[in-house]
Image (tube, helix red, strand yellow):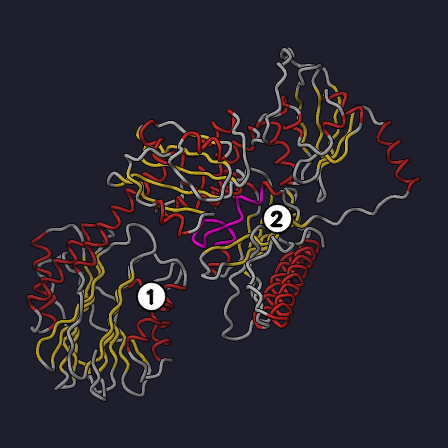
């Protein structure tokens, strides 16, 4: 394998211990990591070959399994890979969906990609087929933890809309092999971690021709009309004939080893570079015409494969007047992004920011895309709050350094506050320029060049974006414009996200303030309650739980769900709890009837489901009634958990004359009652009864002596780890303790 990571590319290693044994242990760990990288690379090459895929990528999780890192790729240009090198598990990206949900994702072409994954379709609007799958050991051992890793394969645009059985079997087999390798490495004490930068595997080179064959091939190329050249998958010119160089108007020495749009200013257009991108991703032939400033139109025919792109250049008759020669352009002192690359970065960032909800999301997307794409080593986002600059996120800096600069007064004259006062960016090519402009300020970040970009939203500066580079850098006008535009996109998204975060915090505080702060202690009764907000929206709704102490042996318990996920739902939830409290102690049917009449008098326009239980420990009975709520679960000592089917009752707030019926059930020592809202058991695409049965089975499998708090955490954890939730969860567990324990 080639291009496997060296020592400076791998994940962090432990410091060697003192003495010979420590050095030997470090060398052994390093050798094991290198072997793991080679094995992964070889497995990826085999996977692509067996499945007929042109591009392959392996993603590995971070320790918290919240982010997937691109560890290794084959057949993909670095420029294409870097923006996708870090994928948050909640992103709407095929590999995130595959790993998070444990399912196979298939995209059969450009139209399906754009429909199901708009962000991917916008940034890569090319024809290709894609498969993403989680890495699951084969055969999967029982109770084995998932690896949290994923495999992505791409096929050329000529691929059929569906995988063949052979291709699907090859993908499944590759996932099993890769997962088994990851599992063995983890069991051996050296788990495979993602490297600091993605490893770019090169395709195996074709056989080297002998002298006679090479001479014949060159003679064949020279006899062809026009000119010929070859690009690698990154777009670099690896071979060019003198005829091609003459047509392009530049010497061979300037073109070989360069990107065409960097060596030839007239090719620095998004249209021309986009043709290359389309050929490199789709692996389909492509043609276009362009007019150099020195002569007639040229036709470019691109023929890609897994090792690069062959280009045929031939002169054609002009179909329109040739533009006048462009004035010579001086090469910039430092390389800067081409116009097509800049457009690609802008589109990628804009598409990613449309999915950013919280300020943390904006920081992550900006850091994931800008730091690698722009060659920066560090990034920091600062916003103005209460006349101070507050750091909302950073990448590449240490937390200790950021703490030193968090809270700088806006009145202090620094590069960070300059943009807030003037709305103008600052660029410093080296430390000397920064020191000359702000002699009293010591940055101390170890960097050598900086861009301080004002974050302007709705015409006003709201903060500063800092980009830092490890080496001195000349910011040419084109690059300055690109960075300023990127900062503008980030500012709009950050302003919107901060407003959302403030609204979310207000709503969440309202809801948590309406829920009980603590549950009353009752002798001989174990109690546990949990509340989990939905994964989407404002994280606020009308789910509630309550436990009301009537006397030393009697309690009332209620769980309900107000329709909606907004402040109105939370406010109505507080009114329902108040109504239940006011009538607690009365028979359950009467409690629900009185609460219903109150809600219909209020005319809130929202309906509420509720289940109410009156538990008498002395009489060892429980009376329950429901108003359109999911049936509770009851487990007697020594038995399984069963659904307690209650007489149906109308939702609260519809008919003021509605009546409700209560049932009596035995509540002996050891009996467990589980009340919950539908968020615990509702899974998109599955029957509600199946979800309830699954929770009942999990309760039945739990030892009766386990604390109810442990069971509550287990049920919430199971719901959290399943399919994405769209509803809140309220859970209340009550058990008649045999030893007199209570919580």
Above or below, 482 relative to 192: above
82 is within the stretch colored magenta: yes
In-image side of 485 versus 159 (left or right): left
Judging depth in this view, the residue of 23 and 125 nearest the camera is 23
Judging depth in this view, the residue of 619 and 594 nearest the camera is 619
Above or below, 637 relative to 557: below
Q: Secondary structure at mark 2?
A: strand
Q: Which residue is mark 2?
A: 154
In-image side of 228 versus 519 (left or right): right
Quadrant holding the N terminus: bottom right
In-image side of 43 versus 675 (left or right): right
Residue 27's spot in the image, x, y percent? 65, 65
The answer to whether the residue labelled 2 contacts the one labelled 1, judged by CB atoms less than 8 Å apart, is no
Question: Disc 2 or disc 1, which is closer to the eye?
Answer: 2
Of labels 2 and 1, earlier in sequence is: 2
Q: Which residue is mark 1?
A: 681
Could one spot residue 488 in this view of the protein?
A: no
Q: Secondary structure at mark 1?
A: loop
Judging depth in this view, the residue of 166 and 155 nearest the camera is 155
Q: Range of the magenta residues?
A: 80-96
Could one spot residue 294 in this view of the protein?
A: yes
Q: How many marks?
A: 2
């Amino acid at each position: 394998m080639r291009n496997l990571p060296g020592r400076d590319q791998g994940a962090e290693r432990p410091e060697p211990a003192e003495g010979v044994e420590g050095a030997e242990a470090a060398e052994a760990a390093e050798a094991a990591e290198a072997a793991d990288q080679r094995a992964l690379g070889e497995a990826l090459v085999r996977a692509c070959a067996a499945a007929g895929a042109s591009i392959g990528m392996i993603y590995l999780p971070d320790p918290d399994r919240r982010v997937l890192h691109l560890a290794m790729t084959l057949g993909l240009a670095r420029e294409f890979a870097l923006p996708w090198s870090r994928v948050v598990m909640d992103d709407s990206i095929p590999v995130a969906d595959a790993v998070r949900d444990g399912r196979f994702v298939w995209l059969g072409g450009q139209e399906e990609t754009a429909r199901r994954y708009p962000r991917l379709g916008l940034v890569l609007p090319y024809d290709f087929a894609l498969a993403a799958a989680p890495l699951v050991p084969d055969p999967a051992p029982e109770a084995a933890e998932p690896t949290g890793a994923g495999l992505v394969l791409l096929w050329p645009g000529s691929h059929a809309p569906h995988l063949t059985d052979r291709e699907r079997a090859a993908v499944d087999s590759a996932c099993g092999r890769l997962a088994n390798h990851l599992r063995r490495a983890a069991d051996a004490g050296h788990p495979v971690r993602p490297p600091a930068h993605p490893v770019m595997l090169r395709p195996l080179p074709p056989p080297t021709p002998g002298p006679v064959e090479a001479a014949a091939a060159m003679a064949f190329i020279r006899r062809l009309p026009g000119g010929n050249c070859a690009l690698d998958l990154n777009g670099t010119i690896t071979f060019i004939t003198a005829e091609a160089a003459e047509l392009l108007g530049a010497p061979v020495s300037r073109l070989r080893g360069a990107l065409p749009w960097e060596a030839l200013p007239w090719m620095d257009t998004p249209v021309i570079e986009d043709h290359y991108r389309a050929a490199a991703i789709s692996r389909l032939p492509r043609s276009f015409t362009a007019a150099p400033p020195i002569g007639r139109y040229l036709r470019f025919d691109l023929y890609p494969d897994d090792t690069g792109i062959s280009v045929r250049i031939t002169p054609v008759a002009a179909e329109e007047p040739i533009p006048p020669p462009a004035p010579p352009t001086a090469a910039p002192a430092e390389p800067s992004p081409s116009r097509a690359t800049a457009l690609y970065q802008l589109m990628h960032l804009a598409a990613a920011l449309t999915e950013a909800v919280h300020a943390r999301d904006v920081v992550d997307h900006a850091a994931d895309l800008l730091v690698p794409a722009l060659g920066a080593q560090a990034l920091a986002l600062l916003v103005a709050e209460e006349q101070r600059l507050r750091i909302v996120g950073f990448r590449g800096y240490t937390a200790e350094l950021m703490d030193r600069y968090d809270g700088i007064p806006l009145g202090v004259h620094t590069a960070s506050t300059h943009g807030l006062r003037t709305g103008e960016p600052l660029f410093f090519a080296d430390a000397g320029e920064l020191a000359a402009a702000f002699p009293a300020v010591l940055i101390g970040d170890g960097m050598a060049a900086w861009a301080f970009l004002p974050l302007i939203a709705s015409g006003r500066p709201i903060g500063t974006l800092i980009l830092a580079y490890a080496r001195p850098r000349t910011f040419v006008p084109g690059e300055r414009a690109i960075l300023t535009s990127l900062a503008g996109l980030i500012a709009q998204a950050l302003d919107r996200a901060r407003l959302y975060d403030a609204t979310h915090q207000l709503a969440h505080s309202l809801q948590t303030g309406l829920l009980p702060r603590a549950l009353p202690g009752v002798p001989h009764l174990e109690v546990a309650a949990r509340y989990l907000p939905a994964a989407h929206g404002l994280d606020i709704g009308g789910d509630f739980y309550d436990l009301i102490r009537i006397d030393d042996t009697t309690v009332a318990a209620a769980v309900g769900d107000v329709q909606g996920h907004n402040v109105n739902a939370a406010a109505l939830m507080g009114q329902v709890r108040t109504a239940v409290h006011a009538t607690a102690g009365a028979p359950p049917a009467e409690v629900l009837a009185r609460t219903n009449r109150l809600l219909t008098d209020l005319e809130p326009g929202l309906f509420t489901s509720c289940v109410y239980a009156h538990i008498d420990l002395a009489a060892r009975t429980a009376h329950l009634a429901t108003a359109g709520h999911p049936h509770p679960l009851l487990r007697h000592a020594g038995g399984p958990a069963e659904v307690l089917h209650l007489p149906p009752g109308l939702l609260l707030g519809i008919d003021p004359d509605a009546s409700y019926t209560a049932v009596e059930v035995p509540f002996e020592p050891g009996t467990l009652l589980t009340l919950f809202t539908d968020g615990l058991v509702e899974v998109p695409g599955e029957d509600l009864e199946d979800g309830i049965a699954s929770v009942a089975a999990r309760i039945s499998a739990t030892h009766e002596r386990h604390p109810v708090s442990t069971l509550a955490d287990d049920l919430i954890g199971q719901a959290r780890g399943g399919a994405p939730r769209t509803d809140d969860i309220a859970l209340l567990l009550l058990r008649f303790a045999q030893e007199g324990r209570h919580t």
